[in-house]
Amino acid sequence: MLEPEVESRPWEEQLALDDASYRDQISYLLERSAFYRTKFGDAGIGSPAEAGGLGDIARLPLTEKAEVKATATAEHPIGAHLCVERAEIARIYSTSGTTGTPSYIPLTKGDLDNWVTGSARSYAASGVQAGERIVSTYNAGPFVAGAALDAFERIGLSHIPVGTGNTERLMLAIELLDPETAVLTPSYAAYLLEWAAERGKDLRGSSVQRVLVAGEPGGGEPAFRTKLEEGWGATVTEAMGIGDIGASLWGECEEQNGMHLGARGFVHAELIDPESGDAREISDGATGELVLSHLRHRAAPLIRFRTRDHVELRTGQCPCGRTSPRVRCIGRTDDMLIVRGVNVFPSAVREVVNAFAPRVSGHILVRPRDPGVKQEPPLPVAVELAENATPDEELARAIGERLRSTLVVQAHVELVPWGSLQRSEYKSKLVER
């Protein structure tokens, strides 16, 4: 553990500390945040006493990313939730802005230090050790993931940044510099298996002993993880962050049974029903949408922020000694489709299909017929065949039956030739409308 005193602290003790931090955070917001003064006021909460403590957090309204972004103007590009003066901001990250103007995420010096601390705990959980070499593949400079890369120095690792889309450079760095660890998206880790095989390169024989995946769901899917581990000859663990809240908030330990909250003390996690917004109990095996609140943030804190990540919780004791709850990300609730009342995550479809390897490549594409979330069966799913495989009606039928029995969804499975579905050196596209 990077910080044993913190990471092994009994969870009830952590919650007691977090309650004090939360009450201070609410007072701070009511004093400094125009956004939350209005939002809390509309909910009938005008004072810290009316907000209560951490056990009363469900009294407060949920925060949507769109409503925060709607308060940003040309004069105030960060938004009405900004709580500090210009001179107090040490760094401003941005989102990619693929759907319009980027969102800007300011940090004070203390906020940035907390982000790096939480990320360092999360990545250290994987088993990386000071003095080892780690190669990273994120073009993270302008984006929140940049703070996660700062965590490698905090751990004491020798960092080799390569960036996205430089596969030749990445493989050369692995061959010549012998890093023990590689950090990639799950999609890129899978892409490299094919890339290496086509060129006769032996990933299993490389120096890489650990593959740390983040940036999208998938690293926790058993069949997909097995594929990566066998192809790389390395242990695969995952990490997860939420741009508006923090980089690499969660990180998986060597037990590989869910991601621990590395940002404990800085962030409080809840679970809600994604449709009703009602709180769900934090218990072993519980599922729902992850909701996060800042506890000790200064620049632009967020309370009860909807992440849109659908997760499963693990609360039992972990042999590693860390005491925080763990999560496994099932998929994004905004990618979810509903087929005759059944929630279907594209990543779950991929997990079912991967069980049919080596007859399939593992690449899938869900092609909804109807606009919106609700779909009529059968759900069209393109499944890519393995290299040199030929279409087989019996295989398509077997995959369809497995999808029905596992996910309770009727699907029309179309087998498509090897190489016909797009590969990615960053994140995979699993849905095409």
Image (cartoon, rainbow, N blue to C red):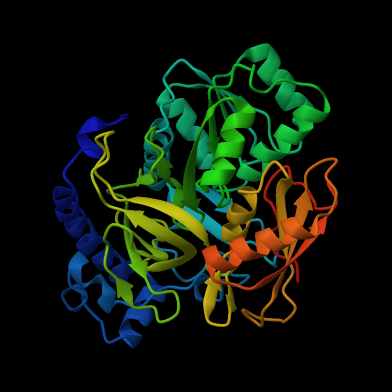
The residue located at (18%, 41%) in the rendering is: 9
Q: Which of the 4 quarters of the picture holds residue 225?
A: top right
Coordinates of residue 142 in the picture (x, y in percent): 62, 46
Coordinates of residue 285 in the picture (x, y in percent): 33, 59
The residue located at (42%, 50%) in the rendering is: 88
Tell me how many marks there are: 0
Is residue 87 at least partly visible in the picture?
no
Q: Quadrant of the C terminus?
A: bottom right
Coordinates of residue 57 in the picture (x, y in percent): 25, 71
Is residue 408 at least partly visible in the picture?
yes
Left or right? Give the position of 370 relative to 50. right
- Extreme-front residue of the structure: 394
The residue located at (82%, 29%) in the rendering is: 198
Left or right? Give the position of 247 relative to 190. left
In the picture shown, does residue 332 fall above or below 162?
A: below
Left or right? Give the position of 189 relative to 35. right
The residue located at (42%, 19%) in the rendering is: 130
Q: Quadrant of the N terminus?
A: top left
Left or right? Give the position of 306 relative to 158. left
* Towards the viewer: 176 or 415: 415
* Towards the viewer: 36 or 432: 432
In the picture shown, does residue 208 fall above or below 302?
A: above
Coordinates of residue 61 in the picture (x, y in percent): 35, 78
* Towards the viewer: 271 or 231: 231
* Towards the viewer: 214 or 430: 430
